[in-house]
Amino acid sequence: MYKVKTFGTDMKVFRVHEELEALDERVNRFFAERPQARLLGVSDMPVTDDSGATIGMLRVVAYEE
């Protein structure tokens, strides 16, 4: 069965690198807990405020279980 999972994180000034590493870790842990899952695709999308400043990141993964 095909499934989609969305992960999100806030982006704070001067902490972006740490937050992206934490997001990577959450996604990796998700798949480590599901060894039968087969990753099909990954997409990242920034979340912006009214001024266009990036305030977060969404990562969507498609997988087969």
Image (spheres, rainbow, N blue to C red):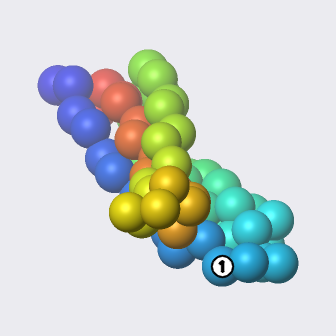
Q: Residue furthest front?
A: 51
**In front of the other: 41 or 1:** 41
Residue at x 56% of width, y 61% of height? 53
**In front of the other: 9 or 50:** 50
The answer to whether residue 33 of the structure is visible from this angle is: no
Using the image, determine if residue 19 lies above or below residue 52.
Answer: below
Residue at x 73% of width, y 78% of height? 13
Residue type, mark 1 in image:
Lys
Q: Residue furthest left?
A: 1
Image spot of residue 43 (x, y percent)? 48, 32
**In front of the other: 36 or 48:** 48
The picture quadrant where one finds residue 27 is bottom right
Residue at x 42% of width, y 64% of height? 49
Number of marks present in the image shown: 1
Using the image, determine if residue 16 lies above or below residue 64.
Answer: below
Using the image, determine if residue 1 lies above or below residue 30.
Answer: above
**In front of the other: 29 or 22:** 22
Image spot of residue 19 (x, y percent)? 69, 71
Image spot of residue 52 (x, y percent)? 50, 55
In the drawing, does residue 11 fall left or right of residue 1? right
Quarter occupied by the N terminus: top left
Image spot of residue 32 (x, y percent)? 56, 53
Quarter occupied by the C terminus: top left
Q: Which residue is mark 1?
A: 12
In the drawing, does residue 63 fall left or right of residue 2? right
In the drawing, does residue 16 fall left or right of residue 36? right
